[in-house]
Image (tube, rainbow, N blue to C red):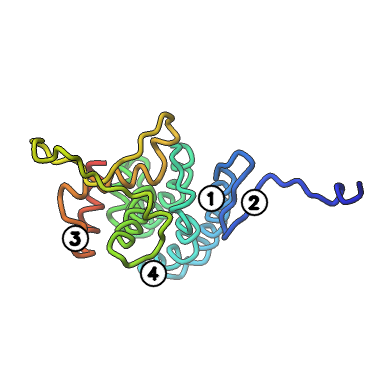
Amino acid sequence: MIWLDLIKIVETVRDLGVCLNTQLTFRDHIINICKKAYRNLGFVLRRIEGINSIYVVKTLFNALVRTHLENNAIIWAPHETKYSFMLERIQNKFTRFLYLRLYGVYPFYPLMYPTLFILGMFGYNNLASRRKFALLSYLFKLLRGKLLNPGVLAEIKLNVPANFVLRRRQPPMFVVPYGRTNLLNKAPMTQALRTLNKICEQIDIFICTVTEFTRTSYYIICYND
């Protein structure tokens, strides 16, 4: 039939700015945003020759580069190390360039400074921590009634055992889904609920302030997660 020839077979589908391939993964999306971020980073580094203000340079990077690395990151956040490393390299290259601008020495050789040290000097966290916090912040607002999403809220279940009084140790606040595969165990919702249980051991997320939640979340993500 003629109409069968008009059907175009595609490898990826774009929905609200996020690309999903035929294997139901975000591999192509991550590769595309890395290419776009590298292209924008090169543009920024070429155009800031006469700019001496580090604040202005960081603002350009945040607006033109990091927005691509974090847009809809809750959805496509990778659990594979190689894709996470691809994203981190872009921000690491920028922060090392800032160090070169300030001190005249590139912090790789002979100054083998750790990446986290360079990021902290300029007030940055690694992108993986920011992606985790973005999901935690979304669930926090959802539980506090600041956002409305019944579908996601239905997936959050409280842990209320019948024999709680007889237990010496308080059970975790939320039920963490059990996955038989590594993909399910590292799913964004599973990791977020596991981290929320650690946060609930430190503060009460239902009455704490946003500042307390932010400070505790980053502490758990960076040091205890």
Give yes or no for contact between labels 4 and 2 (Cβ–Cβ under 8 Å): no
Amino acid found under the numbered disc labelled 1? Cys
Q: Marks 2/1: CA distance?
A: 18 Å
Q: Secondary structure at mark 3?
A: helix
Q: Marks 3/4: CA distance?
A: 35 Å
Q: Could you tell which of marks 3 and 4 lies nearer the N-terminus? A: 4
The residue that label 4 is drawn on is 52
The percent coordinates of residue 130 (x first, y second) are 35, 53
Comparing 138 with 123, the one in front is 138
- The quarter of the image holding the C terminus is top left
Q: Marks 2/3: CA distance?
A: 40 Å
In this view, 30 is above or below 53: above
The residue most toward the right is 2
Q: Disc 1 or disc 4, which is closer to the eye?
A: 1
Amino acid found under the numbered disc labelled 4? Asn
The reply to whether residue 184 is visible in this rendering is yes
Q: Is residue 64 left or right of residue 154?
A: right
Give yes or no for contact between labels 2 and 3 (Cβ–Cβ under 8 Å): no
Using the rendered view, name the quadrant where residue 213 is placed.
bottom left
The residue that label 2 is drawn on is 13
In this view, 69 is above or below 166: below
Q: Is residue 221 left or right of residue 12?
A: left
Q: Disc 3 or disc 4, which is closer to the eye?
A: 3
